[in-house]
Image (tube, grey):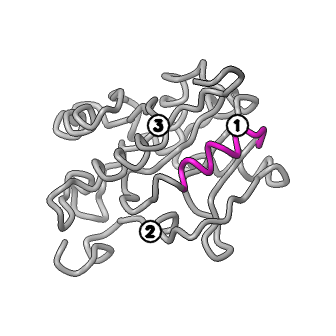
């Protein structure tokens, strides 16, 4: 790491139950045979080597896949409380970082270059940075160290929306030509033909 460069940790949120998908969503293979969550992990790891993946307590198959991809994996007993609780847990695991880029494990089509652009915005001093595709804000969202306490206080299922709303004027949008910032998989019909 270059002198003066900030250390931005990746947090991969992979603790959802996937109920709308019918369960085990993140283990579902895409056309290349690679699990949805593994794709998401690879995209994040290509941009930052320091990635913490948060999985549900007892989800050993997903734990193993993400560990094999190179993530530091942490099981979270409070995952049922929602995405906000899981996000706070991930930040707690990397609390000494200078910022965090929060990615969702059900977004397998994100370009690594997009993640790098969000990290670069944080390194340049943005409090919050997010990619935008054709004017629509997407994921992942980056947060600077000044928001550590607010992120650690999150709970429930709203994720970081409350923090973003509180600091709306400080959000730096990074325009990118990456439709993957808006593409997530919630249900089997969100999968491309032949991958369901």
Mark 2 → mark 3, Cα distance in angstroms? 21 Å
Question: In percent of the image, x 68 and y 59: which residue is there?
Answer: 174
Q: Is residue 168 left or right of residue 34?
A: right
Location of mark 3 (residue): 86
Location of mark 1 (residue): 123
Q: Is residue 29 left or right of residue 169?
A: left
Which-is-in-front pick, marks 2 and 3?
Answer: 2
**Mark drawn on residue 183:** 2
Q: Does the rendering let one see residue 196?
A: no
Query: Residue 190's x, y, as percent?
Result: 33, 74
Q: Quadrant of the N terminus?
A: top right
Question: In percent of the image, x 61 and y 28: which residue is there?
Answer: 152
As rendered, which of 11 and 2 lies closer to the eye?
A: 2
Q: Tag 1's secondary structure?
A: helix
* Magenta-colored segment: predominant secondary structure: helix
As rendered, which of 17 and 87 lies closer to the eye?
A: 87
As rendered, which of 101 and 186 lies closer to the eye?
A: 101
């Amino acid at each position: 790491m270059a002198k003066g460069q900030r250390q931005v940790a990746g947090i991969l949120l992979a603790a959802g139950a996937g109920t709308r998908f019918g369960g085990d969503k993140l283990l579902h293979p895409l056309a290349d045979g690679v699990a949805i969550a593994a794709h998401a992990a690879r995209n994040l790891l290509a941009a930052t080597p320091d990635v913490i993946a948060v999985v549900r307590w007892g989800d050993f198959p997903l734990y193993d896949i993400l560990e094999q991809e190179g993530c530091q994996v942490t099981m979270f007993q409070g995952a049922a409380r929602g995405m906000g609780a899981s996000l706070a847990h991930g930040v707690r695991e990397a609390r000494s970082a200078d910022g965090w880029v929060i990615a969702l494990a059900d977004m397998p089509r994100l370009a690594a270059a997009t993640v790098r652009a969000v990290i670069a915005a944080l390194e340049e001093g943005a409090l919050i940075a997010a990619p935008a595709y054709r004017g629509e804000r997407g994921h992942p969202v980056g947060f600077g160290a000044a928001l550590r306490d607010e992120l650690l206080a999150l709970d429930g299922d709203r994720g970081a929306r409350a923090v973003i709303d509180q600091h709306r004027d400080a959000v730096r949008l990074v325009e990118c030509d990456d439709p993957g910032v808006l593409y997530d998989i919630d249900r089997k019909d969100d999968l491309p033909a032949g991958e369901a």
